[in-house]
Amino acid sequence: MRDVSKLFSNGTLALKGMSLDVRAGEFISLLGPSGCGKSTALRIIAGLGSPSSGTINWPSSRINAKGLPEGDVGFVFQDPTLMPWATVFDNVHLPLKLRGVSKGDARDKIMEGLEAVGLADFAKSYPRELSGGMKMRVSIARAMVTKPRLLLMDEPFAALDEITRQKLNDDVLRLWQQNGVTVIFVTHSVYESAYLSSRIVVMRARPGQVYSDMDIPQPDGRDPDYRTSEGYRQTCQLVSDALQRAIHAAEVA
Ligand SMILES: Nc1ncnc2c1ncn2[C@@H]1O[C@H](COP(=O)(O)OP(=O)(O)OP(=O)(O)O)[C@@H](O)[C@H]1O
């Protein structure tokens, strides 16, 4: 993102001069107070909204007619947005179906994706038969079935209980490590960002822009033990301090 601003038609300046270089293989969290423009930035990257000024560049991708990288981006929203009338299998098939891949040809990829999120036994179930966490897993499998190079996640676990959220954090980390996908993850949570990320970009509000950009030390393994480690506590403290400064900067502006 190079010097991206977004002025909505109601006069809200959601982003002002936001620049961000995303390196391949990173797990970046966009962290910031409500209304600082995290979702707006993510939607612009996804091509779901256009910047008022500035540019999004995709130096290593083939670009389609809409200026977006060809098949390279997957998106997971806070609402899993599954088709209620379709099975789990058919929901995960959707992105491949839109590319003209038949169910038969897609079967292995779909089952591999469901396996990766622990839902292979639920391929024939309908969304109404699944818990909130399982629905989110389907949504992640659907986003990953095309093997995107970039996965965009907009507060995907905010509506889930703490235990489910922690399990899904571990699932996403495993997918990231196994697939080498680059992730941009929007969250309000210092703890979630500190657990997941290789880099945390703290945003400030009014106007929305990058306030602080931190590389996060990578321990050998992130597992439930890491959540109670001194290294994790220190990272949370650093990130929390940066967030407090970002909030203060917006208040005095
Ligand atoms: N379509 C829109 N039209 C007008 N204003 C908008 C629109 N979408 C977002 N905004 C405004 O832009 C600002 C940034 O919103 P955005 O949703 O990107 O923030 P956010 O950091 O993701 O917030 P949250 O964490 O609460 O989801 C807010 O002031 C919001 O009210």
Image (tube, grey):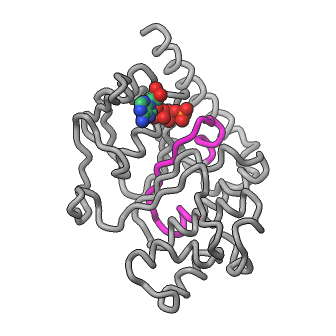
Report whether 84 appears left or right of 73. right
Q: In this view, does 137 lie to the left or right of 47?
A: right
Q: In this view, does 174 lie to the left or right of 203?
A: right
Image vertical order of residue 231 relative to residue 160, above or below: above
Q: Is 232 drawn above or below residue 101 in the view shown?
A: above
- Name the spot of residue 33 as percent of width and height, x first: 54, 27
Q: Dividing the picture into quarters, in which one does residue 117 lie? A: bottom right
Question: In the rendered image, which quarter is residue 241 located in?
Answer: top right
Q: Where is residue 103 in the image (x, y as percent from the top left)?
A: 51, 87
Up the image or down, 42 lies above or below 111; here it is: above
Q: Quadrant of the N terminus?
A: top left
Camera-side residue of 207 and 181: 207
195, 251: nearer the viewer: 251
In the rendered image, residue 187 lying in the magenta stretch gets the answer yes
Q: Is residue 203 rendered magenta in the image?
A: no
Q: Residue at point 72% right, 51% down?
A: 166
Q: Give the range drawn in magenta.
A: 175-195
State the image coordinates of residue 181 (x, y, percent, origin top left): 45, 63
Tell me which residue sits at (36%, 65%) in the image.
72
Q: Quadrant of residue 74?
A: bottom left
Residue 202, position as x, y percentages in the image: 48, 31
Asked if residue 212 can be seen in this view, the reply is no
